[in-house]
């Protein structure tokens, strides 16, 4: 039995959009699970002194394009997942593995690759990061039985529709119904073409398909018109995603639209990386700062859009600081030199917060990020 106690916390950001700040200064973790959250809780165990810094849930990147292992052929880069951990990311959701060299497009090959990616990442957590991969790329010829077979093998995700062979909205809608009936979550690519082979997709397509997520509504990389985002909000129940690999101005505009419509529970944040724009280890934190500083989203709500909103949609027991949740936490602060006083203040002025420590399942995985500036406050970690 192991107990980790995080004390002297300045602010606890819950990840729960309905109550984004939790009162208290202490989090007690037992055997990798959050046991209690509150004020000066009496508990014996290994102590982290947060030194007045902010604690938020580990970030859940809703849009990642992994392949197999901690390597991306897209940028010939090794260790990108571990690098993102240093940006506070503890969970990654695949939006497809399109960068697989020689990716097969026949139904048997598609199924095999999807099941392989799903099972390989279930067996492997690079640097501790929980990568949920095996997102099926829709190709003509897949049948209802194929979706049932993949679901039985553990596949839970459909890759962003529009970047693979299925381009017809009726065919995409049919496969989406098959996938959703098996409990899979479905994303549609929106906006301009990302790479050769992908298409331009607007509101009409998304409304026809009725996915769970309208992917990168601020562009991946080219944004669709804001009026299309409005129609998606009106005519679907999909979450709307804002990503790092998009249009910065549109990120602010989509966020502001959600504030105006009081629909921030539908906002999910991702990076859409690796991509042509590269790998962005701080992409989640930066996108959170964009929606907050440019879109007027309260910073604790921006945290929820990058944690609890994503985990909730996918039915994961992470992404929130509450008893019973997996103890995936980021200790964060204003970066040294910032005009802000703390991590939330940094987000609200467009700075990227500092990551002082990252904890996954109660195990400290990062002791001062190598990728962010140092924190203002001193966080005391056990030797
Ligand atoms: Zn895309």
Image (spheres, rainbow, N blue to C red):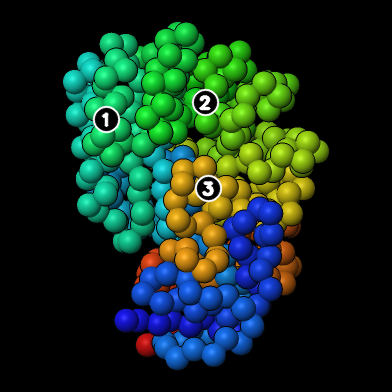
Image spot of residue 72 (x, y percent): 30, 42
Residue at mark 3 to residue at mark 2: CA–CA distance: 16 Å
**Which element carries disc 3, helix, strand or loop?**
helix
Counting every numbered tag in the picture gives 3
Reading the image, the residue beneath label 1 is 150
Numbered disc 1: secondary structure: helix
Q: Mark 3 vs mark 1: which is more N-terminal?
A: 1
Q: Is residue 19 left or right of residue 57?
A: right
Query: What is the C-alpha distance between the residues marked 3 and 1?
Result: 22 Å
Queried on whether the Cβ of the residue with tag 1 lies below 8 angstroms from ligand 1, the answer reads no
Structural distance between the alpha carbons of marks 1 and 2: 18 Å
Mark 1, residues whose alpha carbon is within 10 Å: few (<14), some, or many (≥20)?
Answer: many
Residue 376 seen by the camera? no
Q: Which residue is under mark 3?
A: 312
Q: Is residue 9 left or right of residue 196?
A: right
Above or below residue 290? Residue 174 is above
Q: Residue extending furthest front? A: 181
Q: Nearer the viewer, residue 84 or 50?
A: 50
Task: In the rendered view, tell whether residue 343 sits above or below residue 276.
Answer: below
Residue at position x 35%, y 45% in the image: 132
Question: Which residue occupies the foreground of this view, 309 or 333?
Answer: 309
- How crowded pointer 3 is (Cα within 10 Å; few <14, some 14-19, many 20+) is rated as some
Question: At x 29% / y 56%, what residue is drawn?
Answer: 126
Residue 347, compared with residue 315, is above or below; it is below
- Position of the N terminus, as image quadrant, is bottom left
Q: Quadrant of residue 201?
A: top right
Q: Where is residue 367 shown, x and y percent of the image?
A: 42, 75
Which residue is labeled 2 in the image?
211
Crowd around label 2: few <14 · some 14–19 · many ≥20 (10 Å):
many
Can residue 257 be seen in this snapshot? yes
Could you tell which of marks 3 and 2 lies nearer the N-terminus? 2
């Amino acid at each position: 039995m192991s107990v980790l106690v995080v004390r002297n916390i300045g602010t606890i950001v819950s990840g729960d959009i309905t109550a984004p700040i939790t009162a208290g200064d202490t989090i007690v973790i037992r055997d990798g699970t959050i046991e209690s959250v509150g004020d000066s809780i009496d508990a014996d165990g290994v102590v982290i002194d947060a030194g007045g810094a902010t604690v938020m849930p580990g970030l859940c990147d809703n849009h990642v394009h992994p392949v197999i292992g901690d390597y991306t052929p897209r940028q010939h880069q090794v260790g990108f997942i571990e690098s993102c951990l240093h940006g506070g990311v503890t969970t990654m959701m695949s939006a497809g593995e399109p960068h697989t060299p020689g990716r097969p497009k026949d139904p048997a090959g598609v199924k095999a690759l999807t099941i392989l990616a799903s099972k390989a990442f279930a067996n492997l957590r690079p640097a501790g990061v929980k990568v949920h991969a095996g997102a099926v790329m829709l190709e003509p010829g897949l049948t209802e039985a194929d979706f049932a077979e993949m679901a039985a093998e553990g596949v839970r995700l459909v890759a962003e529709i529009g970047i693979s062979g299925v381009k017809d909205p009726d065919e995409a809608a049919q496969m989406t119904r098959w996938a959703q009936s098996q409990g899979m979550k479905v994303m549609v690519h929106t906006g301009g073409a990302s790479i050769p082979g992908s298409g331009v997709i607007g509101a009409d397509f998304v409304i026809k398909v009725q996915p769970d997520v309208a992917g990168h509504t601020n562009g991946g990389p080219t944004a669709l018109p804001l009026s299309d985002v409005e129609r998606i909000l009106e005519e679907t129940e999909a979450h709307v995603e804002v990503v790092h690999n998009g249009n910065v101005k549109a990120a602010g505009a989509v966020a502001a639209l959600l504030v105006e419509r009081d629909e921030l529970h539908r906002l999910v944040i991702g990076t859409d990386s690796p991509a042509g724009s590269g790998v962005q280890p701080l992409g989640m934190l930066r996108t959170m700062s964009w929606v907050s500083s440019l879109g007027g989203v309260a910073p604790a709500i921006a945290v929820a859009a990058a944690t609890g909103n994503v985990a909730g949609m996918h039915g994961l027991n992470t992404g929130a600081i509450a008893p019973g949740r997996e103890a995936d936490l980021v200790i964060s602060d204003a970066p040294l030199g910032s005009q802000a006083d703390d991590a939330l203040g940094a987000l609200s002025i467009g700075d990227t917060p500092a990551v002082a420590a990252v904890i996954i399942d109660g195990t400290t995985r990062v002791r001062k990020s190598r990728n962010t500036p140092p924190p203002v406050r001193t966080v005391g970690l056990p030797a």
